[in-house]
Amino acid sequence: MDHVSLIANLRSAWAAQDHPHASPASEREIAAFEERYGVRLPSDLRAYFATLNGGDLGREGSMDQEMFSFWRLDQVRTQKELSEGKGGRSDLFGFADWSIDAHVYVIQLRAHPQQSTPVFIDSGRGLQKVADSFSDFLVGYLRDDESVLYGVRSQPSA
């Protein structure tokens, strides 16, 4: 599924829950973010911020019915910034959380948008890769895929 359709499906899912999205990020705001951090957003993440830009309050308390909070672009920070200098990486960016930071979703961003942009759960006890891209993360979110949303792996049968 292309990212335009994914974002439209996300908009519909949030509308069905009466979960309003924020005002879209402007091209100037996106460019300022990229300049500040020396990264380029991949096309799917760029389109998401330019269309929905997280929940209306983002990290400040805007959650869907399952307690997921998608942050606005102005709230996205590096893992290092989020840990307040107590470690963390400057190439991983928090963009959403579950249950008021019980875990944070981080995406690896780089200077070249064609490079891989995996998504991880940062639970404070290490990273767990849950998707190969922001689009893959959205697919998992929309399908309520526990392996993507919570890092739950199915147990092998005995």
Image: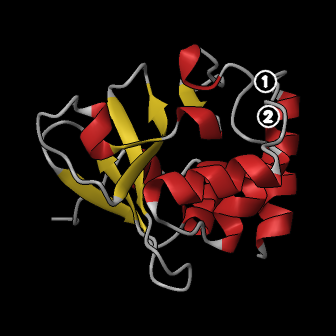
> What amino acid type should be assigned to the residue bearing mark 2?
Trp
Mark 1 and mark 2 lie on one chain; the one further toward the N terminus is 2
Asked where in the image residue 157 lies, by quadrant, the reply is: bottom left
> Is residue 20 toward the left or the right of residue 59 in the image?
right
Residue at 15 percent across and 48 percent down: it is 126
Q: Amino acid at mark 1?
A: His
Q: Residue 137 appears in which quarter of the rendering?
A: bottom right
Residue 138 relative to residue 155: left or right = right
State whether residue 20 appears in this view. Answer: yes
Using the image as rendered, state which of residue 148 and residue 97 is in the foreground: 97
Q: Quadrant of the C terminus?
A: bottom left
Where disc 2 sits, the SS reads: helix
User: Circle 1 sits in a helix, a strand or a loop, which is it?
Assistant: loop
Q: Is the C-beta separation of discs 1 and 2 under 8 Å?
A: yes
Q: Which residue is mark 2?
A: 14
* Residue at x 25%, y 56% (from the top left corner): 128
Neighbour class for label 2 at 10 Å: few (<14), some, many (≥20)? some
Which residue bears the numbered disc 1?
A: 19
Outermost residue on the bottom side: it is 114
